[in-house]
Image: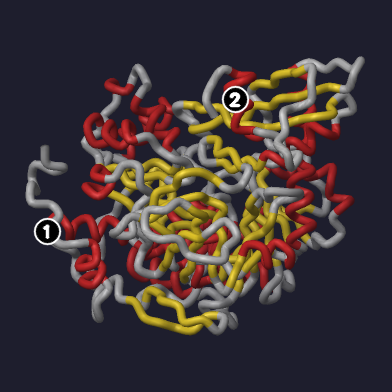
């Protein structure tokens, strides 16, 4: 059976031929070589040099189009740009200088891309903080980044308020949509730029001039550390803006390989409609999804929180063409008993990353939705997309995450990093390219361990086939991925060890059809001490974000099994204590 009955001769061109055609001189995806940190690097030629230039271009091309929809709020590109410009000027009046950090702690709201672009457009550094973090975790992110200004919604403000006395470096707190009382020294965002309904009436002024370019620092995104506290990955303007073309490259390549026409350079695309159901504080939401969406003048529909029925209502109402983010989303819509009550026929594509997807999901998206499945591989440290996979290529290799985009390189290295392994062999995946961040914020030891001559040691075990398609086989790092959220075991284990009754603990991942994995713990208690599962779960929940709390805890009488080096043999624990294969 042909992968696509309408194109039985697929592929019409090889992967190498498609790449050569699409990156040729004069094409949308033209590449060039520039020197970054002393290393020749292949980059997209046609991305804007900075986020200020990006915002200006988007407003000029798509002023009247809708950009953001949230509940009954609708914001055009013109209104968004006016708000960005107005807030950028307010920031400068507050004394914000190039390189100052502005932290952003809110759920997905129309003001999120306003604060983000206003920050980057004047050369300051945006620090999006995980909205699920506890007050203590938020305090760490604010202190570690040295944030000068905090912009928070009411929920996050209430969470961080008890910790503000420990954060003398924060000079101003701006709150949007407060839920209750706020401090007398707190400024309301609406007093600075109004509500979203007011933005269209703000002055039509350009973003103020600033000394920024492609290699200027743009953002610090936090990723959980294998040991200790989270690390902030420093992305430059070029790192993040590389996604503007990387995210769409696999789609263009797929069209070329099946023989469909590829839009000529300069073509203004028809607007898509994205139902964004993952947080904007994630690299996937902020960089891999929102950025390319703006580049195409498309519409972004936001949700207060994920709800499958509400999502289907919005898909029908807004004629959503694209959704996803993590495989969980697709599974929950596919398997909902009321799915047939909603018109979901507008969906053209369901795309995801951040967690492995089963080949069955790939087939179901194509068969049940008649939509094109797409995925990619990347990480916070690669500013999002490194590989892209879609259409017939994905159906043909559903267990792959695709080949690297032309501005990235992959190689498979031996465990000690001393030699590159041949095609087909499994080793640690290393990545290089214009999207790889310049390092971690104030973490020289982690930088030396993770970044080698511009290459990042990803911690994933993988292999490459003869055409360069990448297959993620396992993780070298002790990490669990729950619905796209990274959980590093050591962080949870350290919290468990802090409990006075616990003397031995291990966190493992249990398979879950929709979430991919869920965290579970195996615990040994001090002799004569007792603690319940619920008590330990509450202990973790007080100190870490809810998604890190073990869903199950097994108590054992003996200390956990260890190898000759003293390391807990985690691969055996899911089978021994939870009756499943890990």
Nearer-the-camera pick, 484 or 290? 484
- Secondary structure type for disc 1: loop
Residue found farthest to the right: 528
Q: In this image, 129 relative to 363: left or right?
A: right
Q: Which mark is residue 62?
A: none
Nearer-the-camera pick, 340 or 66? 340
Is disc 1 surrounded by few (<14), some (14 to 19) or many (20+) residues within 10 Å? some
Earlier sequence position, callout 2 versus callout 1: 1
Residue 148 visible in the picture: yes
Estimate the spatial distance between the alpha carbons at disc 2 and disc 1, rounded to whole Å.
Answer: 46 Å
4 w.r.t. 456: above or below: above
Q: Which mark is residue 574?
A: 2
**Residue 337 in picture, x, y percent from top left:** 35, 17
Numbered disc total: 2
**Residue 459 in picture, x, y percent from top left:** 57, 53
**Residue 556 in picture, x, y percent from top left:** 75, 18
310 w.r.t. 285: above or below: above
357 w.r.t. 300: above or below: above
- Secondary structure type for disc 2: helix
Q: Which mark lies nearer to you, 2 or 1?
A: 2
Residue 155 visible in the picture: no
The residue drawn where x is 31% and y is 33% is 316
> Which residue carries the number 1 mark?
12
Q: In this image, 552 relative to 459: left or right?
A: right
The residue drawn where x is 37% and y is 28% is 333
The residue drawn where x is 35% and y is 75% is 46
**Residue 422 in picture, x, y percent from top left:** 40, 61
């Amino acid at each position: 059976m042909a992968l696509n009955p309408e194109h039985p001769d697929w592929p019409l061109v090889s992967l190498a031929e498609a790449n050569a055609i699409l990156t040729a001189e004069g094409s949308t995806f033209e590449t060039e070589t520039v020197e970054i940190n002393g290393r020749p690097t292949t980059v997209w030629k046609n991305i804007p040099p900075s986020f200020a230039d990006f915002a200006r271009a988007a407003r000029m091309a798509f002023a009247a189009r809708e950009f953001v929809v949230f509940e009954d709020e609708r914001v055009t590109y013109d209104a968004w740009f006016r708000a960005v410009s107005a807030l950028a000027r307010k920031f400068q009046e507050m004394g914000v200088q190039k390189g100052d950090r502005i932290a952003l702690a809110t759920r997905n709201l129309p003001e999120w891309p306003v604060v983000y672009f206003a920050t980057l457009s004047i050369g300051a550094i945006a620090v999006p903080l995980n909205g699920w973090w506890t007050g203590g975790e938020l305090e760490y992110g604010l202190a570690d980044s040295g944030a000068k200004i905090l912009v928070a919604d009411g929920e996050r403000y209430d969470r961080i308020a008890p910790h503000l006395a420990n954060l003398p470096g924060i000079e101003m707190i701006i709150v949007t949509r407060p839920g209750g009382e706020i401090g007398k020294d707190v400024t309301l965002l609406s007093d600075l730029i109004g509500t979203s309904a007011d933005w269209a009436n703000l002055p039509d002024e350009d973003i103020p001039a600033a000394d920024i370019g492609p290699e200027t620092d743009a953002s610090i995104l936090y990723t959980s550390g294998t040991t200790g506290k989270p690390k902030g990955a420093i992305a430059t303007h070029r790192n993040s803006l590389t996604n503007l073309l990387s995210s769409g490259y696999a789609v263009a390549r797929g069209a070329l390989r099946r023989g469909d026409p590829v839009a000529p350079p300069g073509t203004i695309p028809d607007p898509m409609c994205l139902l964004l159901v993952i947080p904007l504080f994630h690299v996937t939401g902020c960089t891999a999804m929102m950025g390319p969406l703006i580049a195409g003048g498309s519409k972004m529909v936001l949700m207060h929180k994920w709800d499958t029925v509400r999502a289907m209502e919005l898909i029908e109402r807004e004629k959503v063409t694209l959704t996803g983010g993590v495989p969980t989303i697709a599974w929950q819509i596919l398997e909902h008993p009321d799915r047939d009550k909603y018109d979901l026929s507008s969906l053209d594509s369901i795309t995801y990353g951040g967690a492995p997807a089963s080949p069955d999901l790939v087939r179901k998206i194509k068969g049940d939705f008649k939509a094109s499945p797409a995925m990619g591989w990347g990480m916070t440290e690669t500013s999002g997309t490194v590989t892209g996979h879609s259409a017939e290529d994905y159906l043909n290799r559903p267990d792959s995450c695709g080949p690297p985009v032309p501005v990235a390189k992959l190689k498979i290295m031996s465990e000690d990093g001393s030699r590159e392994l041949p095609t087909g062999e499994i080793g640690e995946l290393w990545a290089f390219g214009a999207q790889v961040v310049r390092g971690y914020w104030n973490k020289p030891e982690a930088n030396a361990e993770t970044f080698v001559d511009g290459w990042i040691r990803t911690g994933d075990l993988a292999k490459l086939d003869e055409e360069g398609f990448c297959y993620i086989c396992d993780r070298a790092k002790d990490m669990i991925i729950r619905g796209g959220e990274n959980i590093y075991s050591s962080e949870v284990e350290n919290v468990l060890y802090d409990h006075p009754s616990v003397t031995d603990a291990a966190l493992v991942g249990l398979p879950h059809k929709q979430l991919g994995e869920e965290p579970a713990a195996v615990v040994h208690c001090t002799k004569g001490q007792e603690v319940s599962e619920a008590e330990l779960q509450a202990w973790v929940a007080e100190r870490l974000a809810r998604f890190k709390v073990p869903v199950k805890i097994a108590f054992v009488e003996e200390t956990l099994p260890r190898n000759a080096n003293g390391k807990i043999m985690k691969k055996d624990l899911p089978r021994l204590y939870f009756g499943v294969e890990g």
